[in-house]
Amino acid sequence: MEKNQYLDLYHQMVLIRRIEERSAELYQQGKIGGFLHLYIGQEAVSTGLISVRRPEDRVITAYRDHGVAINCGIPAKQVMAELLGKATGCSKGKGGSMHMADVEKNFWGGHAIVGSHLPIAAGLALGDQYRGLNNVTICMFGDGATNIGFFHEAFNLSKVWDLPVLWVCENNQYGMGTSVERASAVPEIRQKAEGYNMRNARIDGMDLITVRDASLEALEYVRKNGPMLLEIVTYRYRGHSMGDPERYRDSGEIKKWQETDPIGIYRKYLSEKEIASLEEMNEIDTQVDHEVDEAVQFAESSPEPELDELFRDIYVEA
Amino acid sequence: MARITMREAISQALWEEMERDENVFIMGQEVGVWGGTYAVTKGFYDHFGGRRVRDTPISEAAIVGAGVGAAMVGVRPVSELMTINFAFVAMDHIVNQAAKIHAMFGGQMRVPLVIRAVGGGGRQLGATHSQTPDAIFAHFPGLKVVAPGTPHDAKGLLKAAIRSDDPVLFIEHATLYQMRGEVPEEDYVEQIGKSKVQREGDDVTIVTYSKGLELSLRAADELSSQGIEVEIIDLRSLRPLDMEPVIASFKKTNRAVVVEEGWRSFGVGSEVASRIYENAFDYVDAPIKRVAQKEVPLPYNRRLEQHALVQMEDIVQAVKEVTYG
């Protein structure tokens, strides 16, 4: 990678973190409604993963999707405007936090029913395979999604039909407040791929470089051979959503994971490898602060959707 | 015009659309090598091959879910559910996904998916395999629900469904597959969302669709011999629901019976009757009657099952009641 690429990845991770922090504030001020699931702590997963996709590779994820949206190239302004439900949001204010998408950027959503987007991901890949295209569908989901039937039906179909899907389990250790140990029959999610005779790997999701390297290898494998499961072990520092009392874990556990903060690790990496100085990174931090300020300003000053927007896009053919 | 069965009409529609558009393909249980559990896709596998006629695992969430995904990227899958009862295991992908995706992401995605499902009772298949839950699916904005009652409409409407950019649930009644009717030789497409007058008459309006049409046509003959002329409006699709011909007919007859195979509660009859009252209250000469299945899970025993299902005589009786005859 060139220096500017290293710094771009740093920029993306910091941007996600600041957007999420600002979103939490706006939520508390009542400016963001509904549910809000923050990506803080997991930034290296989607940043590393999506950094190695080709533009023609599709991305689809679950409801913790703001970071993925940023990594796919949706401008911070449109993400923030969607959170505020404005007409200028990436889903015109109709999707909200959990349903962001931009088809032009090959980002196919933001899906809020746990596991339901896995068969859809198989379908995206089926459509591409049917037309003889060589692109991969990257489908991200949480550890909690691997206990639902959709996961198993999608895994089975993808293997039976050799669909080009890179299944990416972001194992952040909890499905809402229930730990993997309490919810899954197997401790490592990657084991579930064994039952489908599917190649799998389990990697550290706090280290951007590790994620990037493993993702690149996995993508090329899928492009040639069919589906694979990549389990990326990570941790969310905030609650499941904004209304999480967090009775299921103690603060010591969170603290321990914060010591392996993905942004901190990456800063250290860039500095030790003499790729970038701390000053350069601090400069990016400041730049991100401005960017987020601008995004919030844009979102707040954007118009509400017109009332007749309510009846638009229900059907393609009226 | 050729006189063909409903099964042949549906089969022809699929075949001709697959010949017309390379993007159209079929997937479902036993659609390929087996030739379709109702023989609708007999011969397809040999002609089109396994890429376009795809046998799936018994995995409804995958059949519909992958259909949704493939449709999103621009191909035109026809996902077949062996029976509509199995739609309940694919419910999420029908109602939470297919019906919502276009609106929820602000119009940037389309789901040109057809879900074919065989429904209906009367074949002694017991409670889980005999349902007519059409009204449930018609509840969801974003989905189109089509249920033809003649070979002509089945062919023309299935073609319309395949060409539609919206998700369409296409419900076929299993006991209508052998029904014969006139079907044009040339390519034609019917418009989804248009009700149709299937028989003209001045005394009573019967509003129905699918299996109810066959029963109502027979009832109409019987009633005619007794001096009552009914007009039959075939809804053909439950969503969009085209009430115009219904209201126009009702304003002429001032009396209506709604016939459906599903259960009465929260059903098609309730919806149609309400809309008539809302739009033509001043024309009402008698309370609108709903003819529907008795409110029980359908039993296996033939006698009991037939007792639960709508019979031609029930329609005759209801028509006489609204005419105070």
Image: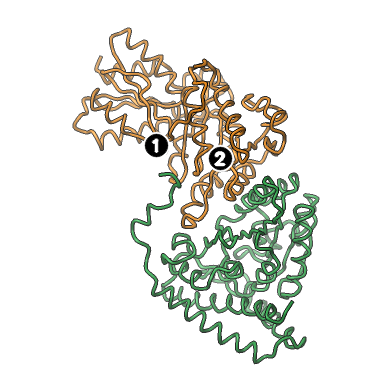
Question: Residue at 70% of width from left, 87% of height from top?
Answer: A276
What letter labels the chain drawn in green?
A
Q: Is residue A110 visible?
A: no
Q: Secondary structure at mark 1?
A: loop
Judged from the image, the secondary structure of the residue bearing numbered disc 2 is helix
Residue A205 rendering spot, x and y as whole percentages: 72, 71
**Mark 1 or mark 2: whose residue is earlier in sequence:** 2
Q: Is residue A260 left or right of residue B267?
A: right
Classify mark 1: residues with Cα within 10 Å, few (<14), some (14-19) or many (20+): few
Number of numbered labels in the structure image: 2
Chain B display color: orange
- The residue marked by circle 2 belongs to what chain? B
Mark seen at residue B266:
1
In the rendered image, the residue lying farthest to the left is: B282
| Residue at which label 2 appears | B88
How is the model colour-coded?
by chain
